[in-house]
Image: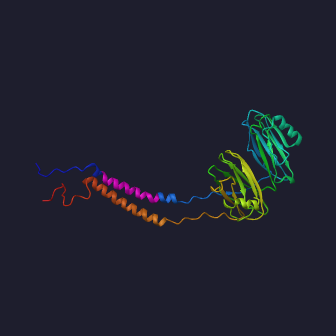
Amino acid sequence: MSDEPSRRRPGPWRRAAPWLVAGLLLATASLPIAAAVERLPSAPLVGFARGANASAPVTVNLTDTPRFVPHALLGTSNSTLTVLLVNQGSYSHTFTVSRVPHFVLNTSWTPTQLSAWFVANGSLANVSVAPGQEMYANVSLNASVGGDSFEFVSLVPFQFQAGMYGFLNVTNSGPGLLLSENTTDGLQFVPNQLAASPAHYPASVDVLVTNTGSLGHTFTLAAQANYTLSPANFTQYFAAHPPLVSVDVPSGAGLTVWANFTVLAPGVYQYICEVPGHFASGMTGNLYVGVPVPAPPTPPSTAVVATWVLAGSAALLGIGVALAVVASFTGRFPRRPGGGAHGHPPA
């Protein structure tokens, strides 16, 4: 019977320690990768203008909600706007356009009062659409109505009072350059950079502003190019320099309004929201007209540092794994000084 002392079995924590070290080294090696991904610059959103097609018909859906979708239309002076009316519901609707510019009809009127107003003032178009049917409405816009806005409604009793109305905005000249902008409850314009490249000046620009949240906003554009507005000076500035355009963006997700204006020269035009506190919270953007949109700033490169850190971490990881493998067979690392294969002094 051997008189060698029996080998003590290593405790569980001692066996687990190498693997714990290896895990920590693995996490260290992954940190540079995560940091590199986090530092990747995000491209800014830029909305680019497209040319309007004055001859293309516009489709408006009539629903039983009741609503016009969309409820904001764009026309150009000295032209005819063709509207395809699609009744998607089970009730009849009308598309009736007021002849009186900049007049907002009163939703508290009774159906009789509303009909009497149109009898007295006339309409630019009045088309009735049966359930499931389609009809065309041609709206003639003469040269004098540029910059005007006309309300359109459904005259079917109580549909207007329930919200079936919209506005036709007419540009001064056309076709113009079309842009899209969105407002958010986070008090941001998305995108906050718009770009248009007119072929000549003055240039007509039309921005369709859509509310993606529940808060009301404004889209207010500075009259001067290359002038920087601030929350401290914009009130005095607009008192001295009326904005190129200022429209109220209706509260409610999906509601829209057209901002139609004319620019006389190239440059950078700032737009803001004038609702108290919104501009101060960062609700502003820039319209680049005939000038390039600046490239986003390039952050300092960390590629060299990340490569060396990654290489070093990988080396440490290899050492840790090697030690862990040895320890799994010996039960201890480093081994007890002077210990033999069986843990006792050599003969």
Give percent across and percent down for residue 240: 76, 62
Camera-side residue: 46 or 277?
A: 277
Colour option used: rainbow
Q: Outermost residue toward the top? A: 90
Give percent across and percent down for residue 196: 72, 60
Residue at image point 77% right, 57% down: 261
Camera-side residue: 16 or 314?
A: 16
The answer to which image quadrant residue 174 occupies is bottom right
Give percent across and percent down for residue 186: 62, 51
Left or right of residue 301: residue 164: right
Residue at image point 60% right, 63% down: 296
In the picture shown, does residue 229 fall above or below 102?
below
Where does the magenta region start and end? 16-33
Residue at image point 16% right, 50% down: 6
Give percent across and percent down for residue 243: 75, 58
User: What secondary structure is the stretch in magenta mostly built from?
Assistant: helix
Instruction: Tell me the quadrant of the picture where the C terminus can be found.
Output: bottom left
Q: Is residue 70 magenta?
A: no
